[in-house]
Image (cartoon, rainbow, N blue to C red):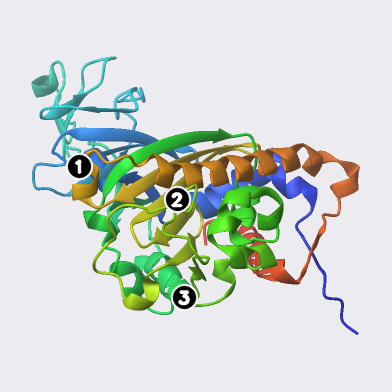
Amino acid sequence: MASSLIPTLAGHYYTDPSIFTREQDLIFERMWFCAVRSSDVGTPGAFRTVQVGRENLLITRSADGLARAFLNVCRHRGARLCTEESGAVKRTFRCDYHAWAYSLEGKLVAAPNLVKMPDIDQVEYGLRSVAVKEWLGYVWVCLADDPPSFEQDVMGACEERLGDLGAIERYGLEALEVGRRIRYDVRANWKLIIENFMECYHCATIHPELVRVLPEFAGGYAAQYYVGHGAEFGPGVEGFTVDGGQGVTPIGTIAAEQDRRYYAITIKPQVFVNLVPDHAIVHRMFPLAADRTIVECDWLFLPEVVASGVDLGPSVELFDRVNRQDFEACERCQPSMASRAYAQGGVLVPSEHHIGAFHSWVTDRLHQIRGK
């Protein structure tokens, strides 16, 4: 009789710097990566800098309204062009080292004695651009020379989880506004965070507030386990809030069957989308080391809700507690990944078996031939 248990990844997959380097190369630098909220670069010249794999990126918006992304490196001597995390310029990005300046489109437009250097092609020596897409109100980037299909990898992940793409589009995420943003510095490997988000075997143990709102989670099966399934609010629960009380104005475009339900989506390699009737919660992970991951979490509400000044605290507090409970659990696991007790890994119980598919996906990516 076949065992109902399947092995996990071995512990060194979560601690070995060389494996993390391969993940940066073969996963984060070759797939679509959700970098910033579109509103973070909402006007020409507004910018944010983010770490994607081993590269620091400068993301901005040009005068034509298009989001653009560049390697944050001056083409002269390699100085980091923008050292601030966010800000705005009028027309150019200027390097503080030798004053080379670049347009919002990335073209080299000024440098001391530039007219005396006719051999410098202002386009060729412009900033190195990176592929960009905008969807769901976020700017997605891809460092690959030949980016994979955005429709298949990103939009397809939502369609696979919900059953059809319209199910997420009805929430109108691109029109929602950030009501709250919290950044978490998690001392754990990015895979531990994904694994935690994908399963609910732990929900009854560490998420009492969440289980009170979504009582079916007490059974150990996460919403992501079933295609198209959304966890139903419990009896007497009025909203997705810390005390189950009433939330804010609901998103009027969702379908009737989406009311009083919670949906969760994992978009590999670093995005979690959570959907409830009156808001959405989007997590973006920025893996910085084998044992450190920054998670930036946005709570998105209707613009009129944010503008009204209504107290968003009860809605934000619920998932903020869930996040902190989850991240504490991940940090509790991280040191043990180096233990001889976990050298061969652990096991997955039946309600976690879909994590086995994630592990297979990771190892398949890591075994790709370099340069393929």
Of pointers 1 and 2, the one earlier in the residue sequence: 2
- Disc 1 is placed on an element classified as helix
Question: Image quarter for residue 56?
Answer: top left
Residue labelled with disc 2: 241
Q: Which residue carries the number 3 mark?
A: 160
Going by the numbered disc 2, the residue's amino acid type is Thr
Q: Is residue 130 left or right of residue 342?
A: left
Q: Is residue 132 left or right of residue 42?
A: right
State the image coordinates of residue 65 (x, y, percent, origin top left): 12, 48
Disc 1 residue type (three-letter):
Ser
Determine which of the numbered discs, if any, sits on residue 308 in the image: 1
Secondary structure beneath dot 2 equals: loop
Question: Which badge, 3 or 1, comes first in the chain's sequence?
Answer: 3
CA separation in Å, label 2 and label 3: 28 Å
Residue 251 x/y as whole percent: 27, 62
**Residue at horizontal 25 percent and vertical 15 percent from the top:** 98
Give 267 or 235, whichever is nearer the viewer: 235
**348 up-or-down from 167: above or below:** above
Q: Position of residue 219 (x, y in %)?
A: 68, 67
Which residue appears farthest toward the bottom when viewing the image?
1
Q: Is residue 92 above or below residue 200?
A: above
Is residue 369 at least partly visible in the picture?
Answer: no
Looking at the rendered structure, the kind of residue marked 3 is: Glu
Residue at 29% across, 14% down: 97
Q: Quadrant of residue 21?
A: top right
Distance from disc 1 to disc 2, alpha carbons, whole Å, reads 18 Å
Q: Is residue 333 left or right of residue 85?
A: right
Residue 152, percent from left and from top: 40, 71
How far apart, in angstroms, are the residues tagged by discs 3 and 1?
36 Å
